[in-house]
Image (cartoon, helix red, strand yellow):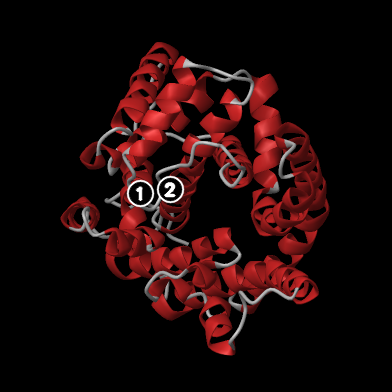
């Protein structure tokens, strides 16, 4: 095998602790997904911008109560998703662009699609069973189920039932990410990546006042191209920095994330600052914290798959007991994910062998 370095990739690009950063991201996501649906908690600006939300958070910061941590996780926790997009592109670039080995388009897309589908289906049917037990109708008629089973549900105009269970919209987005990466970004110059970033950001700015269109864009790759491209470019051109530089970047990016949450135009660029903050934080954390985060990262797939169902069950009984419900939800999710991850690993390895 030719192991020569691709001219598109820098030989000095840093190696990041992907496991720890993935652990941080999934903790933010699954805790957010519980907190943001609790009564009386400040909601986030994830798919659309509501000016009232950051000011409600500011009020909570100025008049803190015991529920302030829940408000903060609800408002900011969804930014674990940009970290996952960043890591996805970073990992793809590190894995596939290091050599001149052929990467057939069809095989690449089909293998990644199959892995996503297997993971999705593991969590799909338990949610379906719960809906049948509760006589809920999110899955009917069959025409609503088919796009979810095919992982193309976010391509349709947004309706709540089309992304149920809620977090599973991410599977559709990742299918798009794999397709776009292989067709338009793989082993191409940085101009392609930067062009994709600019076009996608411009689209969001152009439709900033059209809430329904903006929501649709942000449920699809257009709304997540920023962190995805940053992950690709970091894999190629990133440089290692000192601890002092990391601390300075963490402070500046954290301030930027908070202040950037108050206007639409700056909010659209906050995911870039989230990536900077995440990378900086991971570099600064002691190994005593990095190791547990890396372990959580190792079961992140199982956490993502299992937490929507667990959330639906726990919140049904503890909706008004915020911290008790959150604690039970967290423990149960971690335990279920720990047991489920080996199943996911075997299933995805089986898929990988089929495409080897």
- Residue displayed at 39% across by 76% down: 156
- Residue displayed at 74% across by 76% down: 135
Query: Which quadrant would the C terminus be assigned to in this image?
Result: bottom right
**Where is 201 relative to 44, above or below?**
below
Q: Residues within 10 Å of mark 1 (few under 14, many from 20)?
A: many
Answer yes or no: do the residues labelled 2 and 1 have beta carbons within 8 Å?
yes
Q: Which numbered disc covers residue 101?
A: none
**Where is 279 relative to 176, above or below?**
above
Q: Position of residue 186 (x, y in %)?
A: 33, 62
- Residue 276 visible from this viewpoint: no
Q: Nearer the viewer, residue 53 or 191?
A: 53
Q: Secondary structure at mark 2?
A: helix
Q: Which numbered disc covers residue 90?
A: 2
- Residue 7 visible from this viewpoint: yes
Look at mark 1 in the image and give the residue it sits on: 232
Q: Nearer the viewer, residue 246 or 305?
A: 305
Query: Would you identify the image quadrant in which residue 140 lies?
Result: bottom right
């Amino acid at each position: 095998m030719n192991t020569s370095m691709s001219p598109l990739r820098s030989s000095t690009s840093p190696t990041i602790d992907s496991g720890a950063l993935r652990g941080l991201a999934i903790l933010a996501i699954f805790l957010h997904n519980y907190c943001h649906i609790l009564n009386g908690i400040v909601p986030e600006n994830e798919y659309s911008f509501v000016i009232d939300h950051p000011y409600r958070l500011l009020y909570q910061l100025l008049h803190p109560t015991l529920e302030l941590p829940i408000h903060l996780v609800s408002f900011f926790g969804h930014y674990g998703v940009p970290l996952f997009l960043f890591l996805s592109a970073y990992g793809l670039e590190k894995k596939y662009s290091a050599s001149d080995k052929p990467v057939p388009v069809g095989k690449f897309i089909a293998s990644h699609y199959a892995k996503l589908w297997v993971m999705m289906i593991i969590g799909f049917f338990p949610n379906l069973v719960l809906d049948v037990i509760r006589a809920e109708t999110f899955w009917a008629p069959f025409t609503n189920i088919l796009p979810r089973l095919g992982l193309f549900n976010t391509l349709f105009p947004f309706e709540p039932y089309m992304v149920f269970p809620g977090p599973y919209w991410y599977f559709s987005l990742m299918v798009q990410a794999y397709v776009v990466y292989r067709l338009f970004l793989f082993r191409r110059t940085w101009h392609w990546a930067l062009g994709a970033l600019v076009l996608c950001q411009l689209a969001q700015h152009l439709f900033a006042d059209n809430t329904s269109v903006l929501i649709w864009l942000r449920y699809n790759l257009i709304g997540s191209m920023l962190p995805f491209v940053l992950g690709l470019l970091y894999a190629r051109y990133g440089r290692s920095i000192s601890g002092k530089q990391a601390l300075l970047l963490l402070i500046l990016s954290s301030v930027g994330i908070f202040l950037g949450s108050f206007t639409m135009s700056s909010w659209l660029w906050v995911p870039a600052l989230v990536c900077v903050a995440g990378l900086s934080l991971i570099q600064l954390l002691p190994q005593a914290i990095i190791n547990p985060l890396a372990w959580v990262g190792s079961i992140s797939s199982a956490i993502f798959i299992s937490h929507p169902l667990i959330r639906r069950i726990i919140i049904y009984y503890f909706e008004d007991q915020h911290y008790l419900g959150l604690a039970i939800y967290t423990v149960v999710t971690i335990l279920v994910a720990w047991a489920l991850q080996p199943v996911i690993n075997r299933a995805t390895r089986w898929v990988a062998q089929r495409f080897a």
